[in-house]
Amino acid sequence: MLHHILHAYQLRRGSTDTSTAHHASNARSFSMLDGRVYVLHCAHSHTDFRLPEIEASAAYLGMDYELLRTPSRRDPVGVTDDVSRPFHLCKLPSDEAAKALLHRCSCIRAIWELWACADTYGELHLRNQEARMYVPWQSSEYSWKALMQGFHAALPEKRRLSLIESFAYMGLEGPVRMRGADLTWGVLEEYRRPSDDVPAEGPEAEAQDAPAELGDSDPRLLQLFLGRKIKDRSGAMPARDLIDVLNLKKRRYIGNTSMESEMSVIMANMALAGPGKFVYDPFAGTGSMLYACSIFGAFSFGSDIDGRMLRGKNPSQKDSGIVQSAKQYGIQGRLIDTAVFDMTRAPWRTPFRGDVGIFDAIVTDPPYGVRAGAKRLGKRNIELQRDEPFIMPDGTPSHILPDYVPPTKPYHLSELITDLLAYASALLLPGGRLVFWLPTMNEDHAETAIPQHDHFDLVAHSVQNFGRWSRRLITMQKRSGSSAHIPIAHADVAAPGRIRANDKPDEFRNKLFAPTHP
């Protein structure tokens, strides 16, 4: 196992590293003379993760960008961080930068070069004619097609054709081509969602219940965006498509704790996974994070205390468990290896070269007791812990048998997170990222204490709400110049009785499953 890891380390060191100079903040302000304004059309799922993922994508690409105020009828000035809407105005250096962002950021569905935006068609046409962004495309050598799209409202075909004809003044002389057109331009009509409407009374209620008119006269209209769609003919897959590629319904090997594909892609992005990077998951399970990181091009290595999760139900088969899905995705060459061990008793040979760590990122979903509880090596009753191996009747030590399962005891979440930070500080290279989930209860709107460590800075944390409880995706970055040794796992102090998962009432798992009273 270790020679595989060393080989990956040497490959990684010999490759071109992505610069980490932009990790702290890439939303830089630069002159309006620099770059162009684009419309980022984002997916409307997991919106709390959107801005951190855009930031991480720009950091990985070493790209300067600036989110601009996105106006609407309700707020003509607009704000930069309204994730309740699917659109963001963003300044990027060029079309090539826009394409790179589209291929990196999974929350972005499409990117359009902005020609004009307004809240009425009269104003939109006026601004379009003033900006004249369409002039370079008027030549007969450029084919084109138009897309008229409504968001939270369906546009009838007749109205779409009428809208296209209203832009005849642009003088596009090339042929119309529905596939492979040189230019795809269009209007994005953004409407409020019906769920966003506050119930009204009297005449306002009748107007609210009336059929939507669409366009300028529709009170639900928020904004009109006119622009050119950015397309890439290189054949590279947009990051959004990776969610479908990694869909659990299509995966050959999964378990009850497998991470959904969209979240695993987001985690890989937050970890800045990519070619030449080396990523580790200490709670690999069925390998969801390993697949996502490796499909972005990174080398990956995983471990778990339960080898059955790694190997699958038929370990005697050549391709079983994690290897089976890795071959399905064509990434078996980037999945360095998997190993069975307790994170706190890992077989790392330290110090690493230069005493600065070995991994570029640690990406993991620690078990916290909702679908599976965390375990660590040892007897539940410490008094029964053996210091010598158990010998079978034939004289064979039990722990070298192929079907041996070591005894385990509960691993409290607070201890797990503390250990994870300590081990990450030793295993990560300076500038490396630690990305992990932290579950919290939503009761009483209590503030959540974000874990802290002297060697790490908090980059981002985003919340996925499940009603009574939430889980936060924590992203931390190791400070430059910091180094640490692998912590020594001290022997447990003997105590009477059994160690139980419910020993600590304040633990997340015990709060979650505590009886609720009306």
Image (spheres, rainbow, N blue to C red):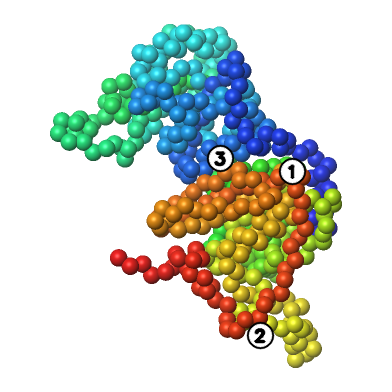
Q: Amino acid at mark 1?
A: Ser
Label 3, label 2: how far apart the Cα atoms are: 48 Å
Residue tagged 2:
384
Residue tagged 1:
480
Q: Amino acid at mark 2?
A: Leu
Q: Amino acid at mark 3?
A: Pro
* Left or right: where 176 falls relative to 453: left
Residue located farthest toward the left when viewing the structure as drawn: 202
The mark nearer the N terminus, 3 or 1, is 3
The mark nearer the N terminus, 3 or 2, is 3
The percent position of residue 290, horizontal first and vertical second, equals 66, 53
Label 3, label 1: how far apart the Cα atoms are: 21 Å
Mark 1 residue element:
loop
- Going 49% across and 17% down the picture, which residue do you hit? 115
Q: Residues within 10 Å of mark 1 (few under 14, many from 20)?
A: few
The percent position of residue 476, horizontal first and vertical second, equals 63, 47
Q: Answer above or below: position of 80 versus 33.
A: below
- Going 83% across and 57% down the picture, which residue do you hit? 351
Q: Answer above or below: position of 154 versus 402.
A: above
Across the whole image, how many numbered discs are drawn on residues? 3
Seen from the viewer's position, the closer of residues 443 and 168 is 443
Label 1, label 2: how far apart the Cα atoms are: 44 Å
